[in-house]
Image (tube, rainbow, N blue to C red):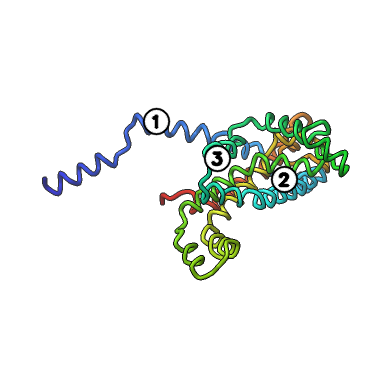
Amino acid sequence: MTRTHVRRARRRASGVPVALLLPALLGLVFLVLPLVGLLARTPWADLPQRLTAPGVLTALRLSLLTATLATLLCLLLGVPLAWLLARVEFPGRRLVRALVTVPLVLPPVVGGVALLLVFGRRGLLGGWLDATFGISLPFTTAGVVLAEAFVAMPFLVIAVEGALRGADSRYEEAAATLGAGRWTTFTHVTLPLVAPGLAAGAVLCWARALGEFGATITFAGNYPGRTQTMPLAVYLALETDVQAAVVLSLVLLTVSVAILAGLRDRWITSP
């Protein structure tokens, strides 16, 4: 085969079939067009004034606070859980992994109902917490943190478990042969090895917590200054002030795009 034939064959192989190009473009338009509509309807002229409105700032501060606390809770509980799934062989590990990922597919409202049945005043643990310590979690800021952590933790666990499985275990074995204990090996060897995956999982966890709606409104309610986060404020503003809802949505969109852009090198391998 001549070089000319080879070049022609490469061009044909690299060409995009029309049967795939058309639905691909339609899919792109379907995903991008709503975002364009949001940008087109944004009141740019009075945007600074609306962003500094007391209700917007209160909801934004509460969202940032609760999302950060939820992420810290997920790190505290999710990293050991990811290590257990990645490093320890035990009966029922597949079932445990499936249970960990259930919140990914579970409707958030159902998650909120489940949290109420466990942590409500008449729940499995809520009654005991209220009677013993006087702690009531539903319809409080702590309830918001709990709801956000419930739906966001799987993102962290999956990311960290994948990073642990991809890490070279020989470094941990070398540390053990040098006399390092399990905790020292974990903190000084394992965590640095999986630091990029841990950071990416934490950021995704934080972003998911920031955008949580269904479980939050079901378990914590919608009280301004106490449980009304940005997504809940958007929902409420749609009934009274559409322009305010657009501005709040723009803030959440900006945060989401910034997070995805920052994680591009971690999650997208193609140039």
Decide: few, some or many residues near mark 2? Use Cα within 10 Å; few <14, some 14-19, many ≥20.
few
Left or right of 100 in this view: 232: right
> For the residue marked with disc 1, what is the amino acid?
Leu
Identified by mark 2, the residue type is Leu
Q: Which residue is mark 3?
A: 97
Q: Earlier in the sequence, mark 2 or mark 3?
A: 2
Q: How far is mark 1 from mark 2, CA to CA?
A: 37 Å
239 relative to 107 in the view: left or right: right
- Relative to 166, does residue 23 appear above or below in the rendering? above
Q: Which is more N-terminal, label 1 or label 3?
A: 1
From the viewer's side, name the closer residue of 82 and 147: 82
Q: Mark 3 near mark 1, Cβ–Cβ under 8 Å?
A: no
Which of these two is toward me, 246 or 139? 139
Q: Relative to residue 48, is residue 243 depicted above or below?
A: above
Q: Residue furthest bottom?
A: 178
Instruction: Name the element at disc 1.
Output: helix
The nearer-to-camera label among 1 and 2 is 1
**Label 2, label 3: how many angstroms apart (C-alpha)?**
45 Å
Distance (Cα) linking label 3 and label 1? 38 Å
Relative side of 226 to 19, left or right: right
For badge 3, the amino acid type reads: Arg
Q: Residue at x 15, y 44 (%)?
A: 5
| Residue 63: x %, y % from top left | 73, 46
Pointer 1 residue: 22
Identified at 68% across, 29% down, the residue is 110
- Secondary structure beneath label 2: helix
Name the residue tied to disc 2: 47
